[in-house]
Image (tube, helix red, strand yellow):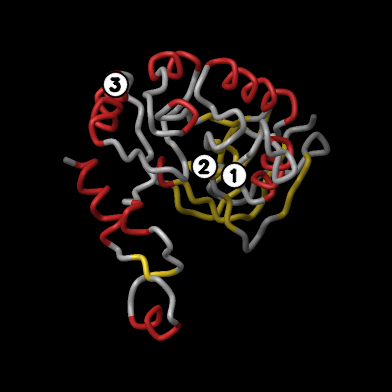
């Protein structure tokens, strides 16, 4: 494939302190150079994309996506999810473990990574479960998941209700320098709730959900 000259865009890259209008050359899938003069020479050997008036940035990263595969392919697949992400400018996405089976063992991680390599158009980083089956009863094999390549742990959509279990999960995750992404919800305060607690909920006759339901879990995890 010919080198790609992206011409006339405004380059924004906070990681390198770049904030200017210039041309950029992409060669073999990598940035070859920036021409800060904005007058890069044209050549028949180049593909030219005129983006004057547009913003050019590094690829975005989405740390919370639902690819649904395996198990819920009628909702989304790794192929369709990564294609949609790419169309939106995302080059890396983290797949949450609310699949069937959940991402709580090496076999499922290998499946997701293999599918992403064959059918995905961008990079997919799997997030493993905190507890087995996302059921909150028993800690998942945190070490095995780390070795298999997860970038974090979450029971996505389900809180880890057991405080002692969460404490151990945080201790293990710190050992592997991987974050836990917790669904912060005290379900004893949210049961039957339909919307935020307040005057509108009262006026509509709906059961409200107090903000403390989230705050309590956040406080617990920080402690």
x 35%, y 52%: residue: 187
**Pointer 3: what residue?**
172
- Specify whether 204 is left or right of 216: right
Residue at x 62% of width, y 63% of height: 53
Farthest residue in the bottom direction?
Answer: 203
Are the residues flagged by discs 2 and 3 in contact, CB closer than 8 Å?
A: no
First in residue order: circle 1 vs circle 3: 1
Badge 2 vs badge 1, beta-carbon distance below 8 Å: yes
Q: Which residue is mark 2?
A: 61
Q: Indicate the position of residue 164 as horizontal and vertical percent values.
A: 23, 31
Q: Is residue 209 left or right of residue 74?
A: left
Q: Which residue is mark 1?
A: 90
Marks 1/3 in contact by CB < 8 Å: the verdict is no
Examine the image and state in which quarter residue 143 appears.
Answer: top left
Q: CA distance from mark 1 to mark 3?
A: 30 Å
Q: Position of residue 218 (x, y in %)?
A: 26, 48
Q: Nearer the viewer, residue 173 or 71?
A: 71
Q: Judging from the image, what secondary structure is the residue with disc 2 in?
A: strand
Between the C-alphas of marks 2 and 3, the distance is 26 Å
Q: Whole-percent x and y of residue 165?
A: 28, 29
């Amino acid at each position: 494939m010919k080198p790609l000259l992206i011409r006339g865009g405004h380059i924004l890259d906070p990681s390198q302190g770049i904030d200017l209008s210039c041309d950029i050359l992409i060669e073999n899938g990598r940035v070859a150079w920036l021409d800060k003069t904005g007058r890069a020479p044209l050549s028949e050997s180049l593909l030219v994309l005129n983006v004057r008036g547009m913003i050019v940035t590094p690829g975005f990263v989405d740390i919370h996506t639902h690819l649904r595969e395996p198990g819920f392919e009628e909702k989304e697949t790794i192929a369709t999810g990564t294609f949609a992400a790419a169309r939106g400018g995302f080059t890396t996405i983290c797949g949450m473990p609310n699949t069937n089976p959940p991402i709580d063992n090496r076999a499922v991680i290998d499946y997701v990574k293999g599918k992403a390599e064959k059918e995905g158009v961008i990079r997919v980083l799997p997030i493993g479960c905190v507890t087995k089956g996302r059921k909150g009863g028993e800690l998942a094999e945190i070490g095995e998941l780390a070795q298999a390549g997860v970038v974090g742990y979450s029971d996505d959509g389900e809180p880890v209700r057991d405080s002692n279990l969460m404490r151990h999960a945080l201790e293990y995750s710190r050992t592997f320098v991987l974050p836990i992404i917790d669904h912060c919800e005290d379900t004893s305060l949210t049961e039957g709730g339909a919307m935020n607690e307040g005057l509108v909920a009262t006026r509509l006759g709906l059961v409200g959900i107090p903000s403390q339901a989230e705050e309590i879990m956040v406080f617990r995890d920080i402690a």
